Amino acid sequence: MSINFISILTKYNYCLKSVIILIGDFMNLFKYTLDNKRYHTLNYEYKKKFGCKVFKVSLNGNFTCPNIDGTVGYGGCIYCSKNGSGEFAGDKTKDLVTQFNEVKNILEKKWPNSKYIGYFQANTNTYAPLKVLKEKYETILKLPNVIGLSISTRPDAISDEVLDYLADLNKKTFLTIELGLQTIHPTTSKLINRCHTLECFDNMVKKLHSRKINTVVHIINGLPFETKEMMLDTIRHLNKLPIDGIKIHMLHILKNTPLETFYKKTKFHVLKKEEYVDIVCDQLELLKDNIVIHRITGDPKSEDLVEPEWLVKKFGVLNEIDKELEKRNTFQGFNISVLNMVRKLAIQTVKSKDLVIDATAGNGNDTLFLANLVPYGKVFAFDIQKEAIHNTKKLLNKNNVNNVILYNHSHDKFNLFLKDYQNRISFIVYNLGYLPRGNEQITTNYKTTINSLRQALNLINKKGVIVLTIYTGHDNGLESQKIKEYLETIKDEYNIFEFHNTCDVKSPYVIYIKQKKTV
């Protein structure tokens, strides 16, 4: 009895260890969150930096805007309200200290040991003489438990003089500059009357970064006539810039704005909640995971809102985003690495007792991952290089994994060693190219890979999946080309999908193959 109990307990612990490894190695969901979100939360960032609850207190510094007074344009952005997009900022008829204390006194009753960040929100908060800016900013910084400032502005409204002052201020407190961008597309930018160029925005981001000033960017989804792909392009562009955070808004049409007039005239499409959730999740999957999500939806006042009505239920939108990411089994930055797609496919396909193959063991990372997926099954791992087999064995031993059989042979020798496993394999993974940190002259080639694929198709069971990660840089894309030509010959029998995480044709991409269901 005791021996059986120990055996069961050992298997249980091994399985539990596997689950922990899978969560840590694949999903990595909780790296930048404290509340099970699948994106990099501001709450996490503040807690990490300050060790306590931190609140932003919205303020109205009674600034104007160069896009209102005629300096660069008139009337402001067409969506902007009379409050300068500061509906939840303070009352500008009151002094800044009164505004601040009215909010702080409410918050400290529930969170008495909190810290605060003064958030200059309404209009353009660097658009004033330097003397005025210093007086307003430093008035707030002198208040108890204020540990920083967040200043919302435009990229064309920070003079060199102000920039130098902000750099000095950044050395004394936690400073964040929030830059409005909204879209990278010039046609849309002109339509909404932004009155600055993308080049102007990019240059200001770089100037702030060179001074080590934390930079957060505002974008809007659902701008008139923009497609989903256009909104994703905005994220792709931001990934290339040294930004620290992002605020994602849904376009809301407010009463008594030029946008309301334009909407009534054109009846442009307003995103439904399901569309917005889908777009945001796609954007998060594209966005680098080190970029902090400061906001992921808007929350206009219901009495001012024309459309969309669903936006007033902010927490409902947040919950739908969480549910959609969970349904997809993805997270922020998921689409940056094709490895995430490979491992997602493995998790969706493989059961704990299955037989699986790593066709290119390499340094053993995929082999280890698969071994932890099948604690009661078996992994067959192949590699033609002795160095690869040595590295894989070393990694497996380090992790006390013993359900792997290693073959120091090419993957086109499946039939020689696995002839008894026809139609029994659940998952086969290939990582084509050369051994990372190894001899780049030794690579996979299309002849042995295609020969291996022919054998692999006979090995997988009816629900089995074959996944290839293809790197095109080792042979000018010849292997990739030949594999695609071969796959054309079997497409009537198998579903064949491609997954690319970038438009760069030289970047690795994934092909996965699954047998078509027969009626």
Image (cartoon, helix red, strand yellow):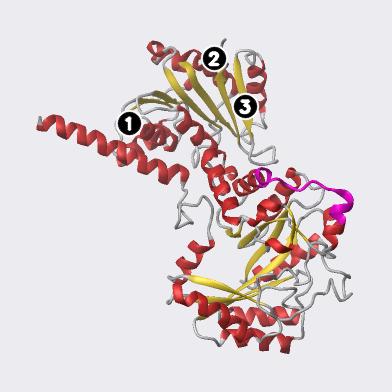
Which residue is depicted at the point 47% across and 44% down? 27
Residue 335 in the figure: left or right of residue 436: right
Q: Is residue 256 above or below residue 352?
A: below
Segment colored magenta: 262-276
Residue 515 in the figure: left or right of residue 300: left
Could you tell which of marks 3 and 1 lies nearer the N-terminus?
Answer: 1
Q: Is residue 138 above or below residue 479?
A: below
Q: Picture coordinates of residue 142 (x, y %)?
A: 56, 88
Q: Picture coordinates of residue 165 (x, y %)?
A: 67, 83
Residue at the far left: name it. 1
CA distance for labels 3 and 1: 29 Å
Q: Is residue 58 above or below residue 484?
A: below
Residue 480 or residue 236, whichever sits in front: 236
CA distance for labels 1 and 2: 28 Å
Secondary element type, mark 2: helix
Instruction: Tell me the kind of residue under disc 3.
Output: Phe
Residue 442 or residue 263, whichever sits in front: 263
The residue that mark 1 highlights is 375
Could you tell which of marks 2 and 3 lies nearer the N-terminus?
Answer: 2
The residue that mark 3 highlights is 497
Q: Picture coordinates of residue 278 (x, y %)?
A: 64, 43
Q: Is residue 246 above or below residue 279?
A: below
Res. 157 visible in picture: yes
Which residue is depicted at the point 82% across and 64% down? 257
Q: Picture coordinates of residue 175 (x, y %)?
A: 60, 75
Res. 192 visible in picture: no
Corner quadrant of residue 493: top right
Packing grade of label 3 (10 A; few <14, some 14-19, many >=20) is: few
Q: Which quadrant is home to the N terminus?
A: top left
Residue at the far front: name it. 303
Instruction: Tell me the kind of residue under disc 1.
Output: Pro
The residue that mark 2 highlights is 454
